[in-house]
Structure formats: C-alpha cells, structure tokens
Image: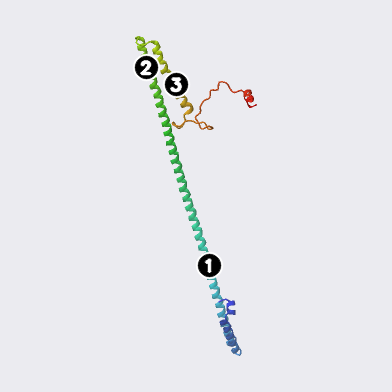
Amino acid sequence: MSLQTQLTDPSTTVDNTELKAKIDTLKNDQNALKVFLNSEKDKLLQQIDDQKKITFDKVYGGLNDASQANLTIIALDQKNKQLNDIQQKVLGEQDKSAHHVTEDKNLAKRKYEMNEWSVQNKKETLFIYSMFLILLSGVVLLSALLNMGIISSYLFTMIVVPFIIIFLMVVIYRARLTSVYRDKRYWNRRTFDDKSGRLKIPTFAICPPSSTGSSETSN
C-alpha cells in the first residue's frame, strides 16, 4: 500500500486515531512508549519495503514481458526475411525455367520454319528440273522425228518454241516470287507493301514524269 493510499484510505485514518490514542496512554511510561514507537516504525518500514518489492516485481515483470515480446518480433522478422529469400530464390528459378522453356520453344519453332522453307523450296526446284527434263525429252524426241523426216522444221519450231517460252516464264516467275515476293521466314506468306497493303508490283516507267508538264497541268 502506498503512502498516498494510506493517507486517503478511511481505514488508515482510523488506525492513525488509534495510534494517537495509544501514544496518549503511554505518555507517562517513556520506555513503553519508546518500544511501541520502534515497533510501529519497524512495521511501517516493513510495509514500505514490501511495497517497493511489489512495485519492483511489477516493473521488472513488465520489462521482461516487453523484452520477450521484442525478441519474439525480432525472431519473426528474421523468419520473414528467410521466407522472403526462399521465395525470391524459387521465383528466380521459375523465371529461369520459363525463360529456357520459351527459348527452346522459339528455337524449335524457328527450326520447323527453316525446315519447311527448305523443303518447299526443294520441291519447287525439283518441279523446275522435272519440267526441264520433260522439255528436254520432248525436244530430243521431236529432233529425232525431224531428222527422220516425219515432221517438218516449221512444225518442230511451232511445237518447241512455245514450250521453251512457257518454261522460261515459269523459271523467271518462280525466281522472282522467291527472291522478291515470298517472305524470307514463312514460306506461305507474301511480302506486302506497307502503304497499300498489296503485293509489291514492280513499276516499269518508260519516261519519268516531267516537272514542266505537271506544273502546266496544275495551272
């Protein structure tokens, strides 16, 4: 019990009144009064000492609880950092794996595109060679017939020349298509003009437009 509580507590006031009455009764006996006062003094000092111990225990207990709570918070913070590091490591490994998978997928796709382009190009080349062999066989056959006198030179020319022209047109068209209009990555795509959205058609301007004529037209 604190000193302020002792002064304001009604029971303490009654004790003080009794103490005063007790002292009044012992005024004539100084030895008894001295013994009584020492006894009361010892009781008061003991109460003060007990109160100090109680207060110290409360304060120490509160500080100990606060310290334990602080240690718990520090331990939780360390655990959170460890978990965060583990999570970042796992995410990094997943990102690397996803990057490798994407690279492998793109590489496989690009290899497929290259193989398709190469195979289709070889097919067209084989088609041109086949046409050439057929044309060559026909020319040899007609030449043999011409030498035997079965057909005339006029008929030979009328048959061979159109086939040669057709073959040359096919070869030129195929070369032009592959080198200019065909996409260099996707075999089935064509290269379009960015402005018009149409196939790039070469222009064959014989005479460039004159600036004089255009100015006269505008006037």
Does 40 sit left or right of 117 as displayed?
Answer: right
Task: Give the CA distance from mark 2 to mark 1.
Answer: 112 Å
* Image-quadrant location for residue 170: top left
Q: Nearer the viewer, residue 124 or 217?
A: 217
Mark 3 vs mark 1: give the one in front.
3
Q: Which residue is mark 1?
A: 62
Give the residue at x 53% y 66%.
Answer: 63
Visible residue check, residue 31: no
Q: Secondary structure at mark 3?
A: helix
Check disc 2: other Cα within 10 Å, few if <14, some if 14-19, many if 20+.
Answer: some
- Residue at figure coordinates x 41%, y 29% from the top left: 120
Residue visible at 46% across and 44% down in the picture: 95
Is residue 74 shown to the viewer in this render?
Answer: yes
**Sequence-first disc among 2 and 3:** 2
Location of the N terminus by quadrant is bottom right
Tell me the kind of residue under disc 3.
Met
Which kind of residue does numbered mark 1 sit on? Gly
Please report whichever mark, 2 or 1, sits nearer to the chain's N-terminal start: 1
Precedes in sequence: disc 3 or disc 1: 1
Callout 1 environment at 10 Å: few (<14), some (14 to 19), or many (20+)? few
Residue that badge 2 annotates: 138
Quadrant of image for the C terminus: top right
The answer to whether residue 39 is above or below residue 196 is: below
Check disc 2 and report its element: helix, strand or loop. helix
User: Which residue is nearer to you in this view: 214 or 44?
Assistant: 214
Residue 127, percent across and down? 39, 24
The residue that appears at 45% across and 40% down in the rendered structure is: 102
Image mark for residue 169: 3
Indicate whether 140 appears above or below 107.
above
Instruction: State the CA–CA distance, disc 2 to disc 3.
Output: 18 Å
